[in-house]
Amino acid sequence: MTQELTPFLKELLSLPGLSGYEGPAREAIAAVWKPLVDEITTSKVGSLHALRRGSGAAPRPRILLSAHMDAIGLMVTGILGGLLRFTQIGGVDPRILPGQPVTVHGREALPGVVVSPPDALLPARLQGKPVDMEYLFVDTGLLPDDVKKMVRVGDLISFAQEPLDLAGDALAGHSLDNRASVAALTHCLKELQHMQHSWDVYAVASAQEETALLGAFTSPFDIRPDLAVAIDVTFAKGPGAGDHRAHPMGKGVALGYGPNIHPFLYKSFKDLADRLDIPTLMDVMPSHSGTDGYAMQVVAEGIPTMVISIPLRYMHTPVEVVALKDITRTGQLMAEFISRLEPDFMSKLTWED
Amino acid sequence: MKNLIQKLVETISPSGYEGTVRDLIRAEVEPLADEVRVDALGNLIVRKGKKGPNGVRVMFSAHMDEIGVMATHIDEKGFVRFTTIGGVRPHTCVGGRVHFITGVQGVIGMERPESPDRQPTFDQLFIDVGATSRADCPVKVGDIAGFTRPFLDLGDKIVAKSMDDRIACAVQIEALRALKKTDHEVYFVFSVQEEVGLRGATTAAYGVDPEIGISVDVTGTGDTPKSGFMEVALGNGPAIKVRDGRMLSDPRLVDLMVKTAEKAKLPYQLEILEGGTTDATAIQMARAGVPASCVSIPCRYIHSPSEMVDYRDVQNAVRLIVELLAHPIVLK
């Protein structure tokens, strides 16, 4: 991974930017993208739209690359004796919560820890089992009256664990789903600085993928691209995920294949990757791709869509793990694809063969 | 306002068959509005004001449909089997009465249960309209019915079937009545088919193309014996939705509504509803996206024939909407 990309990814991981509240992540991404693009705006629901103009004759065709920037996390639902009750934003597995360090975004940011009551104090039917979210609390250390001054219903709670460099060029951290893809998209934009491309490129850091695919339903309506590509993470092989449905980590870019993906686009990406010796894996997606692509495909009159994924272990936990080289490969493949998009590519994109 | 509420809740108009309640609301709003139209799905779209220099186009949406049932089979003895329209639960049906939009009335009976502590399933329930044979049964397959239950005025608390969401229809009508002058182009949408998937609000929001979207709907409470945990309680003011099962409100709009309530010294509560959603979800997704939230009326026993709200919360919801429209709407 290029030297400046890893610190940027780590910076992104340290920012909350939970679904619906992407502001901090959006600002950090905008700062890095600004010198790489011609125009940068924010959508009505908080997605970041960055346009890098192509060199072709106007009107130019458009490709939209969407990596969601929102992160899963928790939200305060009530205060009980100074402890915070909470619910999830996006899919959080309550089994991994007890003992996690968190940040409570109250009137000011407060450190906190997720705690569960001692087993013996739980109702008999719940003893000896992982504790449901409704029995977990966040302890900020503050006295009850002070908690009420600092925290209210609806305040966000984000994971506070620092990212961790692992051996073998791997990184562990929360929110690598999908900030790893934001890093890949950033790498793509950097590569495009020294490449010619005739198409207009819209890089989108989308909002609220984890909760509603909101950015993916709305940004393409505004941008009206000819092609759309979702960049997300997919399941890498790990404990309990060893069969054919998971991919080896560090062995290449996963190319989505299934009804959510235009077959001609799959073939175009696959052929190009083979020519360039970029290793790929086929990511079979029989129905919902679980990515922005699912929404983008059916916006307005419909958009030919591609899904590209970075294999990741332990998805939706605070210790997601990715191989850094899968991130750069993903960005590299997108840039190479874009630079080869001819002005008449759309006339070749057909349903034959 | 209670007379209006009573008229609204005693009307039978399940999802897809909103004609009766639409006529009733149309008669109420026509003298108050600048423009009234009905779109292709049957949404009643009511405009007040034109967008001024500091104004925005804002859409409110209260759904006028209600949950109900639909006849699926008439047996040889004249008993009517049925399926549900929207989120009806079997335990709220037994002993209840239904009113078909054809005018026929009936009661819901139940097969002898296999075990007395097991709740019935819908295929164990039937409607008895007093018929003795298929031939003399006045109900045909496909006929639509709503639940009936008289409006009950307990003073501060009022109870009826379809408070969800006729109470919000009443709130929007009263807000329209109170809205004398505004810089905003205000659309009050009385939407169809919310209970079967936010269908009306989806097309209404596309058609109106608002800059701000706010649904007005009921929300649950956590203030009854052994209820699920929820901070919202009846009588503590209208609830400003932070999130529900399918939508995260725009935080800037939540802030604006909170500040508006605080400035006007109106009571309010912040709402997190863990299941269920409102028209705002559909508005938020319309076109290129719309900053959206919801003004909620706290309501006990939602989707039962006896939904209870606090009249003061209802009045304060009207005040909050009117107050919001009296000032510039700037999201920060």
Image: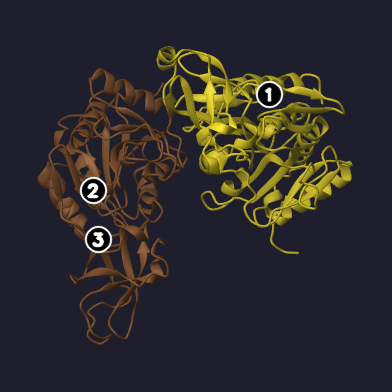
Chain colours: A yellow, B brown
Question: Disc number at residue B112?
Answer: none
Left/right placement of residue A170 relative to residue A144 reads right
Q: Tell us which disc is closer to us: 3 or 1.
A: 3
Q: Which amino acid does label 3 sit on?
A: Phe
Q: Separation of disc 3 and disc 1 at Cα?
A: 61 Å
Q: What element carries label 3?
A: strand
Q: What residue is rendered at 25% in x and 61% in y?
A: B147
Q: Mark 3 points at which residue?
A: B147
Q: Which mark is residue A36?
A: 1
In the rendered structure, the answer to whether residue B262 lies left or right of residue B29 reads right
Q: What residue type is labelled 2?
A: Arg
Left or right of B212? Residue B157 is left
Residue A166: x %, y % from top left: 82, 25
Question: Is residue A70 in view from this perspective?
Answer: no
| Residue B91 in view of the camera | yes
Residue closest to the eye, A328 or A263: A328
Residue B294 on image: x %, y %: 35, 36
**Dot label at residue B166:** 2
